[in-house]
Amino acid sequence: MNAATTSEPTPVKNPTTVERTSDREFVVTRTFDGPARLVYEAWTNPELLQQWWAPQSMGIPLRSCEADVRVGGTYRFVFGHDGSETVAFFGKYIEVNPHSRLVWTNEEGDGGEAVTTLTFEEKDGKTLLVLRERHPSKEAVDEAIGFGEGLRETFGQLDELLVTLGANEGRS
């Protein structure tokens, strides 16, 4: 049950690990070269989310991104090429602790809602990000774990954005 995959076929500076921890849960971990406040901002600022969240290789853009990041606030991400062929992901924030923890629901599924917990742990200017998804059933995890695998690419895109944010911050 504790199968983990650690790195992409080509060597990467900060590998992404995806691990199924139980029938109903998987965990994704990655270290980012940047302080927790910048990594957190990239997860909570809709303008920044739109720059890295959709995997470029899939060719499906994130058309709109709304996030009211506060306890009880909602989010809605819409992917697709035009208004007739879109997919929306949405839910609400149930815990918001700036720069250290976010918890939200994923309400778009038919089999009950999943809950995502994201933690940010900073050490020596780097941030360990741990994403934990708990689903209502084994079948839901079987379907969703591909999302965890897909985060390898989006996290690479987040790495690139953090370089830009850090460079811009140095100019302020």
Image (cartoon, rainbow, N blue to C red):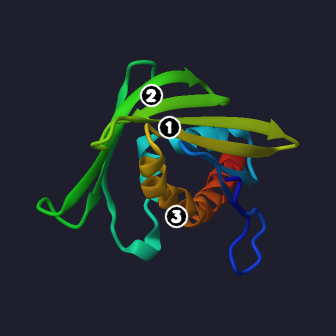
Judged by depth in the image, the label closer to the viewer, 1 or 3, is: 3
Compared across the picture, whether 125 is left or right of 137 comes to right
Q: Residues within 10 Å of mark 3 (few under 14, many from 20)?
A: some
Question: Can you give x and y, in whole percent of width and height, for residue 55 in the image?
Answer: 46, 66
In the rendered structure, which disc, 1 or 3, sits on the residue that comes first in sequence? 1
* Gap in angstroms between the C-alphas marked 3 and 2: 24 Å
**Camera sees residue 86:** yes
Q: Which mark is residue 24?
A: none
| Amino acid identity at mark 2 | Val
Question: Can you give x and y, in whole percent of width and height, for residue 131 in the image?
Answer: 61, 43
Q: Please tell me which residue is depicted at 76% across the width and 53% down the height of the picture.
A: 33
The answer to which quarter of the image holds residue 111 is top left
**Camera sees residue 52:** no
Q: Which mark is residue 150?
A: 3
Circles 2 and 1 in contact, beta carbons < 8 Å: yes
Of residues 15 and 123, the one drawn nearer to the viewer in this rendering? 15
Q: Residues within 10 Å of mark 2 (few under 14, many from 20)?
A: many
Question: Can you give x and y, in whole percent of width and height, for residue 72 in the image?
Answer: 39, 19
Circles 1 and 3 in contact, beta carbons < 8 Å: no
In the rendered structure, which disc, 3 or 2, sits on the residue that comes first in sequence? 2
- Outermost top residue: 71
| Amino acid identity at mark 3 | Gly
Q: Please tell me which residue is depicted at 45% across the width and 54% down the height of the picture.
A: 144
| Amino acid identity at mark 1 | Thr
Residue under label 2, please give it.
Answer: 69
